[in-house]
Amino acid sequence: MIPLRPNIAAMAGYVPGYQPPDIAAWIKLNTNENSYPPSPKVVEAILKELGPYGASLHTYPSASSAHLREVAGELYGYDPSWIIMANGSDEVLNNLIRAFAAEGEEIGYVHPSYSYYATLAEVQGARVRTFGLTKDFRIADFPDRYDGKIFFLTTPNAPLGPAFPVEYIEELAGRCAGMLVLDETYADFADFNALELVKKYENVVVTRTLSKSYALAGMRLGLAIARPEVIASLDKIRDHYNLDRLAQAACAAALRDQEYLGECCRKIRETREWFAAELRAIGYEVIPSQGNYLFATPPDRNGKRVYDGLYERKILVRHFSDPLLVHGLRISIGTREEMATTLAALKEIG
Ligand SMILES: *Cc1c(COP(=O)(O)O)cnc(C)c1O
């Protein structure tokens, strides 16, 4: 027997959404990736950074991603000392747990939301407490004072879609004795976000990613915005060269091309609203969504049957076996053409 820590031996490990090997043969709507390509300026920036014969690659990148903190700071209206860049926002979620929740201490999150928080907590040996949602989309039985070291709030919520109102999140910030981490992965698709709360409450952290709205899941780029004391502690923990050179170049170009981002998100939101209306017209129950996905329940409430029907037609969506979600499907919003094909398939499946 290898001398493994018992919590690592006991854990199952996170299972990410399926990435089929013959990816080009599928309409892939299962991991909320962006079906549009990234800004053409991103590709230019990567090639420029690479240089002839990859000449730039023999030296380490900027350890602190200093330039990116400036670009992101300007974009979001924060001093660079309030920003940390990450190798995907998953990295910064991990480092938040490592910084704030010791072995045996508690972290909390809403169920259903992003179950990776639980995996990260298991690795750390932290305890996990989950809270359900009420019918009016508030957290059920959230205590007046929550003593867990971190509460993760996915807003907009994935996989369901709605975002929590800023006034409500503000109330939660006051009720959390520990940190309140707002996972705003899908904020660029939403009508509003809660970024301003970072300035108002010292325990609020906002995480963002370039994986979804900027169509850069393959580059692994995320960031967090928080008080300089929080950022400084996260800087102690992270891998010192956490973003490679090409990722840094891509990130700067992507953040600077807000016009492209805006146009891409506009198309996706428009397609989302069209697709939601079409689904309702064929009897599906669809939760209003602020993200680039819809949680939709077929009339017979048999999510697996419809998942299988789509799978046979090489359309991949997400079906969860979780009892709270088993009746429905989470469908990422791709291009208008992809969604038209998906709608036709759903009509055929019935
Ligand atoms: C996709 C996703 C992430 C991970 O984003 P990366 O930046 O790709 O690591 C985090 N939280 C939620 C809710 C997500 O859906």
Image (spheres, rainbow, N blue to C red):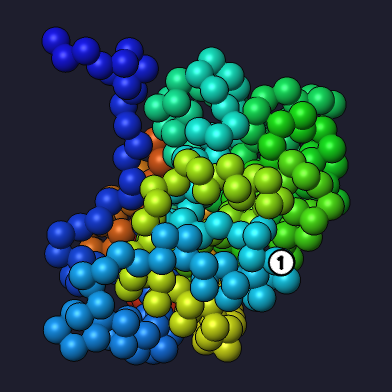
Amino acid type indicated by mark 1: Tyr
* Front residue of 139 and 217: 217
Placement of the C terminus among the 4 image quadrants = bottom left
**Residue at 54% over, 83% down:** 256
- Name the quadrant containing residue 338: bottom left
In this rendering, the answer to whether 123 lies above or below 182 is above
Is residue 309 visible in the rendered structure shown here? yes
**Residue at 35% over, 67% down:** 61
In this rendering, the answer to whether 111 lies above or below 145 is below
Is residue 283 visible in the rendered structure shown here? no
In this rendering, the answer to whether 244 lies above or below 179 is below
* Front residue of 122 and 279: 122
In the displayed structure image, the side of residue 326 where residue 22 appears, left or right: left
**Residue at 53% over, 77% down:** 255
In this rendering, the answer to whether 262 lies above or below 157 is below
Residue found farthest to the top: 1
x then y, percent, for residue 109: 61, 34
x then y, percent, for residue 204: 72, 46
* Front residue of 282 and 151: 151
**Residue at 33% over, 70% down:** 245
Count of numbered circles in the view: 1
Residue picked out by circle 1 = 78
